[in-house]
Image (spheres, grey):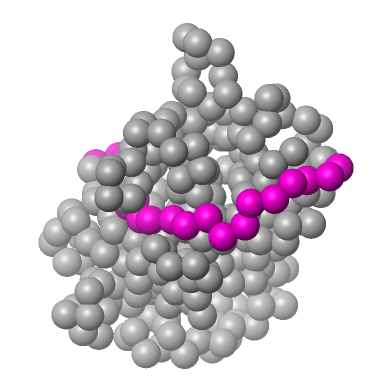
Amino acid sequence: MRIQIVDAFTAQPFAGNPAGVVVLSAFPETEWMQRVAAEVNLSETAFLHPLPPGAEADFALRWFTPAVEVALCGHATLATAHVLGRDKTSFATLSGVLTATATDDGWITLDFPTAPLSPVEAPSWLAGVLGAEIVSVRHTGPNTDDLLVELADEATVRGLRPDLGTLATKENRGVIVTAQAADPSAGYDFVSRFFGAAAGVEEDPVTGSAHTALTPFWSARLGRTELTGYQASPRGGYVRVTLAGDRTLLTGQAVTVIDGELLV
């Protein structure tokens, strides 16, 4: 059985966010897919199979971290679209039907649901766990269940060293930290990082699903619907975003780095 590892939200190998992609004829037992994802040990591994003509989408698609199945994943969907190599592909997922549209120059645009944002008070533990002063907090959902935390500036986001052990005990899928770009001429409008220890991912290199919350947040702040985000993980990656009402378009590139075979 073929498995491919694809670096997503980058045009260069060994950057962006790597994802496993496994194309099947039908979904096997969930336990087997979870074990494969744990063996691959990337932030997500995508499993998909074709649907019959007349179905709601071209493929059924599921995503697994090394620890749990998730309801929405951007980079593994981008990686999957890259592997399939089609002009346009639709996926039936736990977050509804998602589409991926490719252009001849290698860019792929994902059509995802925009995450509703609800202002909330910062949990009493949050500032201490992050080790930074908090400017504001939003809750994202229903597909993501993250805390979106605004920090003072880009330098604070980049320098953050959170207590990942404590984060792993919290109920939310993850914590997104963000700030406006210190220098917009650098090619991005805002910076972010994502910590998903509760879902088995200590720091995700580039999180497409987080940008379904970051996009409406920064669109309202900056007064534009088309923006570019930079996720400042050690690998790093750029996400072009467009706010289209209740949908968010995420655009990026991808490159295959491993093409191999599962023997079990």
Q: In terms of depth relative to the viewer, which is nearer, 132 or 30?
A: 30
Q: In terms of depth relative to the viewer, which is nearer, 86 or 69?
A: 86
Residue lying at 43% horizontally and 85% vertically, measured from the top left: 158
Tell me if residue 235 is in the magenta stretch: no
Percent coordinates x, y for residue 144 in the rendering = 52, 51
Percent coordinates x, y for residue 85 in the rendering = 44, 38
Secondary structure mostly seen in the magenta stretch: strand
Quarter of the image for residue 155 reads bottom left
Residue lying at 72% horizontally and 61% vertically, measured from the top left: 41
Horizontal placement of 146 versus 187: left or right? Answer: right
Q: Quadrant of the image for the C terminus?
A: top right
Percent coordinates x, y for residue 27 in the rendering = 71, 29
Horizontal placement of 98 versus 126: left or right? Answer: left
Horizontal placement of 75 versus 71: left or right? Answer: left
Q: Quadrant of the image for the N terminus?
A: top right
The vertical placement of 124 against 36, above or below, is below
Residue lying at 82% horizontally and 41% vertically, measured from the top left: 32
The vertical placement of 143 against 216, above or below, is above
Percent coordinates x, y for residue 116 in the rendering = 38, 48
